[in-house]
Amino acid sequence: MQFKNPEVLYFLFLLIIPVIVHLFQLQKFVETPFTNVALLQKISTQSRKSNTLKKWLILATRLLVFLSILFSFSQPYLSSKEINENQNFFIYLDNSLSLNTKGNRGNLLKIAAQDIVKYAPQNGVFSLQTNRYFYENIDFLTLKKELLNLKNTSKRQEIESVLLKISEFKESKTKTLTENILISDFQNTYKNVFTNVTPTFSAFKLQSYKKNNISIDSVFLKNKNSKNTTVIVSIKNEGKAQNNIPIAIYNQDKLLSKQSFSIQKNNTKKVTFTLENQTNFLGKVNITFSDTFKFDNTLFFSLHKEDKVKVLCIGNNTKFLTKIYTADEFDLVDANVNTINYNRILKQDLIVLNELETIPTTLVKRLVNFSNNGGTIVIIPSNKAKLNTYNTLLKEISNTSLKAKRKDTLKITSINFNHPIFRDVFTKKIENFQYPTTYSYFPIALNYNNAILSYENKLPFVTEIKAAKGKVFLFSSPLSRENSNFLKSPLIVPLFYNFGKVSYEYSKLYYRLDQENNIDIPIQLHREAVLSLQRDNLKVIPPQQSYQNKVSINTFDYPTEAGFYAVVHQKDTLQTLAFNPPKSESKLQFLNFNSIKNEAKMVKNEASIKDIFTKIDKKNEVQWLWKWFLTLAIVSLLLEILILKFYKP
């Protein structure tokens, strides 16, 4: 039992007044002599006992009257929340692309939004979390407006982030009772997410009535020549086998080729198209099939002329680089430290310092400027390196240095598979490969350890060191044959090839929405100029960084819809980029709440949105008790009157 006005209960001390009156008899007795007192003594004894009982009964009724009146004015009630406590509904409504599908009652997202509007209390205060926005402390009308205008988005909100948001929100609210409601299909959510969950919340799982899905997984090119290009389309099937599914490829809206394919149960299929080469090819692959998700039946891609990565190698014995940086993808230039054209440096994408004995001061200044303009540098020390010149460059770039050479035979045993250089090289992690060996090395004094390859003693063989803007990769050992057999290792090709690829982020066939996409556009802008992304009547200026010979743009927050977007400078279209939904949205992997009953005690899995709000209303319903106490006071008063009138001691 709780009280709306608990301060009234302080007056309970007044109950002592009738008790005092009862205990202290203020009547004065007068003695009267009688001739025969035996009978009087007996009558007197009987009257005193009866009179005492009557007084106790009257005292009890009066105390009950005062007590009932005080409790009535304090307004007691029964409820799971305090009457002065604010009520706030924290609602997470998943509006990811996977909710743009049909359930038993229609589109999942629209029906969920309509049910919230229908069953949510109109006098409530709400905080609405969607996959893109958070609306805090809004009233019912604002909630209704936002829900009815809510659309699907490629932006994904992880359930872990939502639970963290709930915890932070609860801590920020004092004297507020928060009801947490999660409405989602819980796609790609695993039960360990709900292990040791602190905030209690009600959950409703949205489900599609269709249980099979065919999606375009990827598109890539093969056998490109001067006339034709072979386009390979990879199709993924989740569900039963399907036959004679139409698939077509377009250049914008112009149909180029059409065919059909069959695919086995839970399998993948590759469909091949051979197309004539065209300039500014804006491709679209489309499948005609009714399945769970529609958005993954179309994939956009763009073909455009790719510029070569400009590589400048300074040093000797660079023959191995000519086999890696081939003419079809790279523009490799060899230079001697004494004959280098310094004006060429800022025009490069990658500079390799290959075993220089000394780095001239002029070259150091140009390399520092090159790095500050976003360039990539690979540093391979010489056996006879003058460390003071190397350390001058390293400290200018990243406050790193090389220590004195140590002669020790070490094997290179560790690969950092998570580093961008090797992230997509291996299909699985390999162990016990043929370890390359070095016979001497220069220990690296690091303030930022991001080793790519490491020795058996855990020291880095090659590492990425932290630079202000560009990328710098530092070897701790020469690669010459007398000092190492690393040039014979199969690791040499992907390592240096990806040095070249990460030095310039050329446009890809397509990009995925809601991912960190960094794209380099080869243009030199004036100080006030910017690049914009445009599609139809939409125009946005993405985050970007200007360098000497390029502009690097970031597309994490925008665009939000699949399609083609032009990179525009003033009125000139520089490139056209293609964006597609995240692949994870196509998976038919959803959380089964029956599997988390034992682990997730704080999760209340409800059958419908209506049930969620009905149970919350019932739990928080206020049952007022003051009427009952007032009735008790009246009954006690009547009882006292009856005792005084009819009880004759």
Image (cartoon, rainbow, N blue to C red):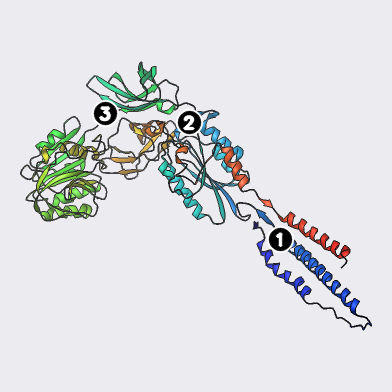
Q: Nearer the viewer, mark 1 or mark 3?
A: 1
**CA neighbours of label 1 inside 10 A, class few (<14), some (14 to 19), many (20+):** many
Q: Amino acid at mark 2?
A: Asn
Closest to the camera, between mark 2 and mark 1, is 1
Q: Residue at x 26, y 39 (%)?
A: 423
The answer to whether the residue labelled 2 contacts the one labelled 3, judged by CB atoms less than 8 Å apart, is no
403 lies above or below 327:
below
- The amino acid marked with disc number 1 is Phe
Q: Which part of the image, by quadrant, shows the C terminus?
A: bottom right
- Which of the two labelled residues, at mark 1 and mark 3, occupies the earlier sequence position? 1
Q: Which residue is mark 3?
A: 305
Secondary structure category for the residue under label 2:
loop
Q: Quadrant of residue 576?
A: top left
Residue 272, image x, y percentages: 30, 20
Mark 2 to mark 3 CA distance (whole Å): 36 Å
Q: Identify the residue at image location x=7%, y=40%.
A: 317
Q: Residue 532: image x %, image y %?
A: 37, 38
In the rendered image, which residue does mark 2 sit on?
100
N-term mark: 2 or 1:
1
Crowdedness of circle 2 by 10 Å Cα count: few (<14), some, many (20+)? many
Residue receiving disc 1: 71
